[in-house]
Amino acid sequence: MKRIVAICGQGVGTSAILKVNAERALDRLGIRASVSASDVASVGTAAANAQVILTSPELVESIGKTNADVVVIDNYFDVGEIERKLEDALG
Amino acid sequence: MPLPEPPDAAVELGAHAADWRAAVRLAGEALVRSGAVSPMYTERMINVVDEFGAYIVIAPGLALAHARPGRDVKADGLAVVTLAEPVRFGHPHNDPVSVVVGLAVRGADAHVSHVAELANIFNDPAAIPALASATSADEVRRIFRKGA
């Protein structure tokens, strides 16, 4: 199963919103994947086996080098935006 | 556990903030007034933006000011501050911010259920403009209960 990690500054709050809405987007797409939420400081371990990292444009630099696709979400409440970007990344 | 409703003390409408720091501080003071947090929590919410940038601006016009659970959180709480003049946080797409939602939770488990509820409310694109133009705390609570 594909793995997706939502990353925010602290691993509580905004990454959890992103996780909830990413799960809704995956449902719409009919894609089975696990979504977890984590913070920037632990992105190395949290995203070690992930295909996709979902995050804010503000955090891309802090995430640094990774083998996962870093997908930037502007509006965390726009499930349509998340759906389009996940489809591109996973499709 | 449902998302706590913001009491009157935690709602400030049409506030004036010179910059993002002042805007987050208003949300922190609203949480302090309602008894959810001690003033240290406000400083921690500001530190988050100093450290990581404007990522708390998660949708156009909306900042979710929050910090990790800690001893400065006395109860789960939600605060809503709307700004008479929107301020820039430094987000490339979602600035300027006219609504600051302050969130404090005592434990990570509560966090997960609360943010799921926030997603239910704010996935409606009408919710942020409705909050920004709300004229009473009752109206704010109605939007959180029933949506825009």
Image (tube, coloured by chain):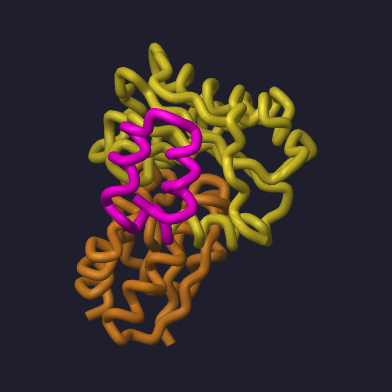
> Residue B78 or B7: which is nearer the viewer?
B7
Tell me the residue at 57%/47% (across/down). A10
The part of the chain drawn in magenta is: B120-148
Q: Is residue A38 left or right of residue A31?
A: right
Q: Is residue A77 above or below residue B52?
A: below
Tell me the residue at 57%/52% (across/down). A12
The percent position of residue A30, horizontal first and vertical second, equals 30, 86
Locate the N terminus of chain B and report the quarter of the image it occupies: bottom right
Q: Is residue B83 visible?
A: yes
Q: Is residue A74 visible?
A: no
Q: Is residue B70 above or below residue B40?
A: below
Q: Is residue B127 left or right of residue B143?
A: left
Tell me the residue at 23%/61% (across/down). A81
For the image shown, how many numbered marks are present on the structure?
0
Q: Is residue B135 magenta?
A: yes
Q: Is residue B52 left or right of residue B69?
A: left
The percent position of residue B107, horizontal first and vertical second, equals 72, 53
The percent position of residue A62, horizontal first and vertical second, equals 43, 44
Q: Main secondary structure of the magenta part?
A: helix
Tell me the residue at 66%/57% (across/down). B110
Find chain A in the image and tell me its colour.
Answer: orange
The percent position of residue B102, horizontal first and vertical second, equals 54, 36
Q: Is residue B5 magenta?
A: no
From the rendered image, report the letter of the chain displayed in yellow: B
**Residue B119 in which image quadrant:** bottom left
